[in-house]
Image (cartoon, helix red, strand yellow):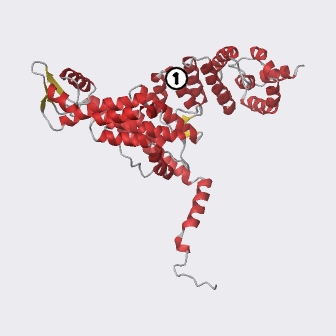
Amino acid sequence: MNPVESVVAQIQGLSGSASDLSALHNYLKQVDEALHSESTQLIPFLDQLDPSKHSLGYLYFLEACTSGPVTKEQAGIFVLTIARFISSCAAEQIRLAPDKFTAVCKRFKDQVLLLDAPLRGVAPMLTAVRKLQFSTEHLTTLHPEFLILCLLAKSYKIGLSILEDAIFEVDQPRDIFLYCYYGGMICIGHKDFQKALELLHNVVTSPMSTINAIAVEAYKKYILVSLICNGQFSTNLPKYASSAAQRNLKNLCLPYIDLANCYNNGKITELEVYVQANTEKFESDSNLGLVKQVVSSMYKRNIQRLTQTYLTLSLQDIANTVQLNSPKEAEMHVLQMIQDGEIYATINQKDGMVRFLEDPEQYKTCQMIKRIDLSIQRIMSLSQKLTAMDELMSCDPLYLAKAGRERQRFDFDDFDTVPQKFNI
């Protein structure tokens, strides 16, 4: 019997019970190298396996098949095969070999990009993420791969579906950096700047022993989104940000810090001149579109400042103060801001006057009470999670050993406060 046929027979015979699958997994680990040496001959044998019943064995064959260089023609075949496998495989089987499944899915992403068809990979990759996850609180290595496909396919809404999950478990530290960075970009694409700011903030303030490229790129976007979302930016990072971030990020993003300073002055002409002078830099960082949105947002911020000073103002005065070209342009900006809930105002078309109003929300409607209640429930749930994690960590032997070593290093009570005399 052909060695590969023998492996197929073992897969078919040991894909039933949990004990059989455990034995099969051990067997496949032993023959894995042999499968890779026969990788070009394995494709016909896939037809003898059922991806839903023999998921573990099928996964080993598929990983070996895709391990070598793949041409564009082969990519077209593999994309269909892998997509069908992801759709029909049994989650409990593929979780026995998560590294193999992750490798296959990453190659799947590379192949749809080779075919210049990222949209084809979005739905299968989302299914792969859900099958690999033990719960929605688990961040897998496939999350960033899924989000990059959503970005390239401009499928921002599908990407948002996975960003709504509360994450508490992470496989690799790098995954959280990429997840939050790509997630922030998806939220920017969807114009959800508040959520984008939160995700980019997570990248910038995540623990890091040395500065990394992801954090630098995230900080650039963090500055721009802060200006769009809040109309201001502070260079002071929170105390819980790593010392590496606090020391290095500002120096690595000086053009963006200067842009923020220009913005804070509130003079649109100065800002436009600065952007024009640094267009090449912003374009090379792929941030020019976001910078243009920053410039556009300054008009809104200047109009918002007027609401703090005046009760009524003519459209002509608004145009002059904010440096818009005409009263009509000022009217369009005000209308858009009213529609977005950024200001409360009425426009008298007859005399071209704008009347600024107070926030009408009384915080006593059923909808608002329900919203507040949901927020309280979410905070209570988070508090319970943190308490449980704190208790778990305080019993962890590795943590206790490290804490004990650190205490010995810095326990100053052990040092004699009286200087010793030394014989030289």
**Residue 108 rendering spot, x and y as whole percentages:** 64, 23
**From where the camera sits, is residue 363 visible?**
no
Residue occupying the point 13% across, 19% down: 349
Q: Tag 1: residue type?
A: Leu
Instruction: Determine whether 77 is above or below 264 in the image.
Output: above
The residue tagged 1 is 152
Asked whether the viewer can see residue 188, the reply is: yes
Q: Residue at x 65, y 30 (%)?
A: 102
Residue at 58% in and 23% down: 125
Please state which of residues 97 and 258 is positioned toward the viewer in this rendering: 258
The answer to which image quadrant residue 20 occupies is top right
Snapshot quadrant of residue 345: top left
Q: Position of residue 226 (x, y in %)?
A: 37, 38
Q: Is residue 93 above or below residue 117?
A: below
Residue that lies at the very extreme toward the right in this rendered image = 1
- Can you say which quadrant of the picture contains the C terminus? bottom right
Q: Is residue 320 left or right of residue 171?
A: left
- Left or right: 207 as drawn, with respect to 322: right
Please determine whether, in this image, residue 78 is positioned above or below residue 324: above
Q: Secondary structure at mark 1?
A: helix
Residue 399 falls left or right of residue 267: right
- The picture places residue 145, in percent across and down from the top left corner, at 57, 29
Q: Observer-nearest residue: 221 or 100?
A: 221
Image quadrant for the N terminus? top right
Residue 40 % position (x, y): 79, 20
